[in-house]
Image (cartoon, grey):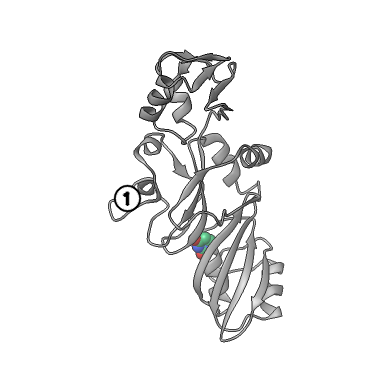
Amino acid sequence: MGMQRLDKIIASTGKWSRREVRELVRRGAVLVDGTAAQKADEKADPEASVIEVNGERLCYQAFTWIMMNKPAGVLSATEDGRGRTVLDLLPAELQRRKLFPVGRLDKDTEGLLLLTNDGVSAHALLSPKRHVDKVYYARVSGRLTAEDCGAFAAGMSLGDGLQCLPAELEILSAGAESEARVTLREGKFHQVKRMLAARGKPVLYLERVRMAGLELDRGLARGEFRMLTEEEAEKIRSLV
Ligand code: URA
């Protein structure tokens, strides 16, 4: 990685802006290998030096990984002339980092969306060969039955030619409207909606609650985001 400006390294954690880093340095709150930094633009090697901010060791990651609780009404795209995208929900400092969503959620789907600028790992996570789990909460119109679960488990063939891998449908409640937890190991366009529609149970609401072993952080309100913890980033690294 080599030498980089301290303000860039510290701001890359997403906890402080570069302006705040300048203030922290002025207050003597930034230490590099035990010595107070003099200037925010001095250089350090984040992988070779111990950098501390306010007495805590900086957790430096070469790439940015973000967990967002996507709200309905925004597109999982990097730019779109027709509407707001998930990147519009990020502050300017993060928007400059060339982040992109790791796979897409439909405009009306809510929940766990990962964003990164680590193209190689994102590509690997999305590879159809990798079969990374994705779990959804779905509310549908109609009564879900054991036959629906059996069809999911067998691997559905959709009328439009899509042959789905075996998937799990766990019924949470059944009635005129039903609720279910759906686990897929692939991510074809509108796949959950298409599979449930093929069973005659159109989706009324869809939320992704888990992906690649990471749970949606319920502390995040819709539209909020946070950096992945070191433990979560390690989970991603172990998958790719
Ligand atoms: N399946 C869908 O149908 N929509 C999504 O947004 C994600 C999975």
Q: Which of 62 and 225 is in front in this view?
A: 225
The answer to whether the residue bearing label 1 lies less than 8 angstroms from the nearest atom of ligand 1 is: no
Q: Is residue 49 left or right of residue 7?
A: right
Residue 37 at x, y = what percent? 47, 15
Q: Note whether 125 is above or below 109 in the view shown.
A: above
Q: Is residue 222 visible?
A: yes
Residue farthest toward the left in the current orientation of the protein: 81
User: Which percent across, then down, holds residue 11?
Assistant: 44, 30
- The local secondary structure at tag 1 comes to loop
Q: Position of 76 compared to 240: left or right? A: left
Of 69 and 21, nearer the camera is 21
Front residue of 66 and 127: 66
- Residue that carries the numbered disc 1 in the rendered image: 80
Q: In which quarter of the image is residue 186?
A: bottom right
Report the residue at 47% width, 27% height from top: 10
What is the crowding at mark 1: few (fewer than 14 residues within 10 Å), some, or many (at least 20)? few
Q: Residue at x 38, y 61 (%)?
A: 73
Q: How many marks do you count on the picture?
A: 1
Q: Where is residue 197 in the image (x, y as percent from the top left)?
A: 53, 75
